[in-house]
Amino acid sequence: MQKHFEKRLRLNNQIRESQVQVIDADGKQLGVMPTNEALRLANERELDLVEVGPSAKPPIAKIIDYGKYMYQKEKRDRGSKTSKAPGQEIKTVRLGFTIGGHDMLVRSGQADKFIKLGHRVRIEMPLRGREKSMSNVGREKMESFLKLITEPFAQEEPVKRAPFGLGVLISPEKRKSTPKPT
């Protein structure tokens, strides 16, 4: 597995080019100028000179507050990670190998509620000790549990063996949109 390392931006005295295309903090083009002149401008404004376009000829450098820029970039990145599309969360319902009929009804009610809310549902049945040798019985219980779920769902994968026991993933069935009468 390759790790992706973000290339760090060069700033202030790390910029090696003799000339840079300069953009000020307001986004106004200041034109091409020697790097030491751009550094002097940045220092006068108590800001940093950051090379944002190293591949351009000459490289593009912005006069900005680097700490503030990195904080806002990190905040944007964090926000994009946490904002998931609705209905993409996977909820889990766990069944015991020796689960009773009433408990199965209660758990199927939970699964119904999750599917109605648009969540995908992973149904798990952990197997311990001798239960592992009777996985066919567990598989039958999982199949009968799926029949108890009243909301329409699509089974994304068959009931299969997992490291902890048995598992299956179901998702809300895509409802066909009916045209509204005019």
Image: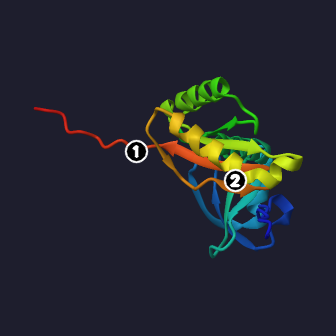
Specify whether residue 26 is in view: no
Name the residue rendered at 63%, 49% in the picture. Answer: 168
Q: Sequence order check: which comes first, mark 2 or mark 1?
A: 2
Q: Horizontal and vertical percent for residue 182?
A: 10, 32
Name the residue rendered at 54%, 27% in the picture. Answer: 113
| CB under 8 Å between discs 2 and 1 | no
Rendered view: 101 above or below 128: above
Q: Looking at the image, what colour scheme do you see?
A: rainbow
Q: Horizontal and vertical percent for residue 82?
A: 66, 40
Which residue is most to the right?
129
- Callout 2: helix, strand or loop? helix
Q: Horizontal and vertical percent for residue 163?
A: 80, 55
Few, some or many residues within 10 Å of mark 2 (<14, 14–19, 20+): few
The amino acid on which the numbered mark 2 sits, given as a three-letter code, is Asn
The amino acid on which the numbered mark 1 sits, given as a three-letter code, is Lys
- Callout 1: helix, strand or loop? loop
Q: Check disc 1 and report the residue beneath it.
A: 174
Which quadrant would residue 121 be assigned to in this image?
Answer: top right
Q: Check disc 2 and report the residue beneath it.
A: 136
Rendered view: 11 above or below 107: below
